[in-house]
Image (cartoon, grey):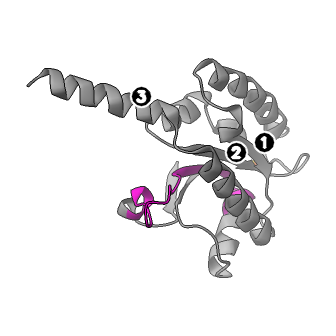
Amino acid sequence: MSTQQGTSPAAVTATTEGQFEPKIIAFCCNWCSYAGADLAGVSRLQMPTNFLVLRAMCSARVDPEFVLRAFAKGADGVLVLGCHPADCHYIGGNYRTRRRIALLKMLLEQYGLDPDRLHLEWVSASEGVKFQSTIKDFTEKIREMGPNPLKEAEEESARVKGESHH
Ligand code: FES
């Protein structure tokens, strides 16, 4: 899996004027959504820069563990972007993805995460504009939700541990 970054790692965690800037991970399938992301980039479409694109050969190759790990490592939102139904290059991989995402959302709830922090969208290679609007809308939604509560819990426990060492 390869990565393409919306911005530098330092900027990913930066907050502008105290405003919460969500960290977004966008898993993109190689054949459609990654090309759509590329098109949005070369077309210089304006969008938030606080996302990191991770390329997978198919949306079905995005292991549930990758998504859970992204949240455990502090992502505030995760997007999974794949080819439109019937366009998947691996015969129905994206139908499997759709079922898997529904299950993952239930799992997220068990971890105390809002299932809307995970979002699946179909973006084709020619849909640079859709990629842009998906990133924009999702970033806005996550910004309203606030930071990933798992991250806050982890920071709090690290702080408590740090204090108990003094
Ligand atoms: S190849 Fe794009 S979703 Fe399967």
* Residue 72 coordinates in the image, percent (x, y): 47, 32
Can you say whether 90 is above or below 8 in the image? above
Residue annotated with mark 3? 153
Q: Which residues are magenta?
A: 11-34
Note whether ligand 1 is within 8 Å of mark 1. Answer: yes
In this rendering, position of residue 109 left or right of residue 22: right
Residue annotated with mark 1? 90
Note whether ligand 1 is within 8 Å of mark 2. Answer: yes
Residue in front for this viewpoint, 118 or 161: 161
Q: CA distance from mark 2 to mark 3?
A: 33 Å
Which structural element holds mark 1? loop
* Residue 152 coordinates in the image, percent (x, y): 42, 34
Q: Type of residue at label 1? A: Tyr
Residue 87 visible in the displayed image: yes
Q: CA distance from mark 1 to mark 3?
A: 39 Å
**Label 1–label 2 contact, CB within 8 A:** yes
Residue positioned 79% across, 65% down in the render = 130
In magenta segment, residue 27: yes
Q: Type of residue at label 3? A: Ala
For disc 2, the neighbor class at 10 Å (few under 14, some 14 to 19, many from 20) is many
In magenta segment, residue 142: no
Q: Earlier in the sequence, mark 2 or mark 3?
A: 2
Q: Earlier in the sequence, mark 1 or mark 2?
A: 2
Residue positioned 64% across, 71% down in the render = 47
